[in-house]
């Protein structure tokens, strides 16, 4: 099979963003409040937030409930055209040291992380907050659903066949970051303070593939400093979804939305039939939970003088306000 590494899977008018959102776990109000509490506790203001890698803008809309203004940016102009919200207008980049909060949901593994963290620091005001999070492989909360877990693991492995080989590509870098629960995201001590690394259901794998399913060496790289705070929590209700087999298929289809050949479709149909049986029937719902990592870091101080024309992490932006 040909590699899909250069393809934007979510591009084009045929992609259904509403169904994508429906078949994803959603951060709760308590999760956002945790971010706001950290931001407020360290002197952050609530004027301008910037949601990086916004997709259809669902995170930006939530952040907009707490901030006076939210910018939403993406590498794809089509994505930003799908942002929902009142009074949305196209904007350029904003000036350095002008942003109070930057959110980066489900996209940090796809970035050059050191360059990205440096860029985010340039955009943030002193005492501004960077919030990065990622959820990993779906995990059946009921231990009795072990067979269902094994089957969804097989399905995800099969779905990722399209991007093999991974060794030496951006996917290798991304998978290693997920194996490390984002611990290899570094916050240089001279620029960042009050770094917190929160991990929910860290006993479940973050990577969507089994270790034996990849063609590179798995390792746990760590850039955690001694002064950083790490918090680990086991909570099988965290972002939990009561999912039937149709929801599980939607999760896979919209996470990796490429067309399957007839032979591949037949194989997936068979695997999802196995999953339906293991879950207890077509309409039977099982609780699905998620391993989640949240990184919070506070900008120490201005790191230099930058052009008043602004810095744009991604080239296409929307302003929601």
Image: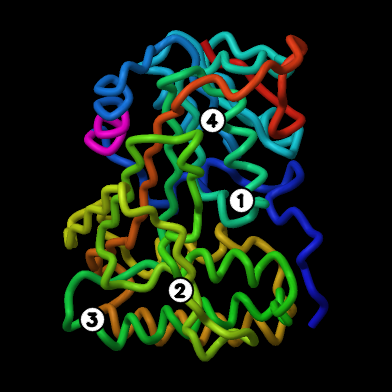
User: Which residue is denoted by mark 3 in the rendering?
Assistant: 145
> Would you say residue 34 sits in the magenta stretch?
yes
Residue 314 percent across, percent down from the top left: 71, 34
Q: Vertical placement of 175 versus 189: above or below?
A: below
Residue at image position (67%, 12%) is 89
Color encoding of the figure:
rainbow
Q: Earlier in the sequence, mark 4 or mark 2?
A: 4
Q: Residues within 10 Å of mark 1 (few under 14, many from 20)?
A: some
Horizontal and vertical percent position of residue 3: 79, 74
Q: Is residue 4 above or below residue 14?
A: below
Instruction: Give, as a single range, the part of the protein colored magenta.
Output: 30-35
Alpha carbon separation for disc pair 1 and 4: 16 Å
* Nearer the observer, 133 or 74: 133
Instruction: Name the residue located 48 percent from the left edge and 65 percent from the top edge.
Output: 178
Closer to us: mark 3 or mark 4? 4
Marked residue nearer the N-terminal end (3 or 2):
3
**Element class at badge 3:** helix
Which label's residue is closer to the chain start, 3 or 4? 4
Q: Is residue 163 magenta?
A: no
Q: In the image, residue 14 lies at what x, y percent?
A: 72, 47
Residue 113's tag is 1
Which residue lies under the disc numbered 4?
51
- Rendered image: mark on residue 220: 2
């Amino acid at each position: 099979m040909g590699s899909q590494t250069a393809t934007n899977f979510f591009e084009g008018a045929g992609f259904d963003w509403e169904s994508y959102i429906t078949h994803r776990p959603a951060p709760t109000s308590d999760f956002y409040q945790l971010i706001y509490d950290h931001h407020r506790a360290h002197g952050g203001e609530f004027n301008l937030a910037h949601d990086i890698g916004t997709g259809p803008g669902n995170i930006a809309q939530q952040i907009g409930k707490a901030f006076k203004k939210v910018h939403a940016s993406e590498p794809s102009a089509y994505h930003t055209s799908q942002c929902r919200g009142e009074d949305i207008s196209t904007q350029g980049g904003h000036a350095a040291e002008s942003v109070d909060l930057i959110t980066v949901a489900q996209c940090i593994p796809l970035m050059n992380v050191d360059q990205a963290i440096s860029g985010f620091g340039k955009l943030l005001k002193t005492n501004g907050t960077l919030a990065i999070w990622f959820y990993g492989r779906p995990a059946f909360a009921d231990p009795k659903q072990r067979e269902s877990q094994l089957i969804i693991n097989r399905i995800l492995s099969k779905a990722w066949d399209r991007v093999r080989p991974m060794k030496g590509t951006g996917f290798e870098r991304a998978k290693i970051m997920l194996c490390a629960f984002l611990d290899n995201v570094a916050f240089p001590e001279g620029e960042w303070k009050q770094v917190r690394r929160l991990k929910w259901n860290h006993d479940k794998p973050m990577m969507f593939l089994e270790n034996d399913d990849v063609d590179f060496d798995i390792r746990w790289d760590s850039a955690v400093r001694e002064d950083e705070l790490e918090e680990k929590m086991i909570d099988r209700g965290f972002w939990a979804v009561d999912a039937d087999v149709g929801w599980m298929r939607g999760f896979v289809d919209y996470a990796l939305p490429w067309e399957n050949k007839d032979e591949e479709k037949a194989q997936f149909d068979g695997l999802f039939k196995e999953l339906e049986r293991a879950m207890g029937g077509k309409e039977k719902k099982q609780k699905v939970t998620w391993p989640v990592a949240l990184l919070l870091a506070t900008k120490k101080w201005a790191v230099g003088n930058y052009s008043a024309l602004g810095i744009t992490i991604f080239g296409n932006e929307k302003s929601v306000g």
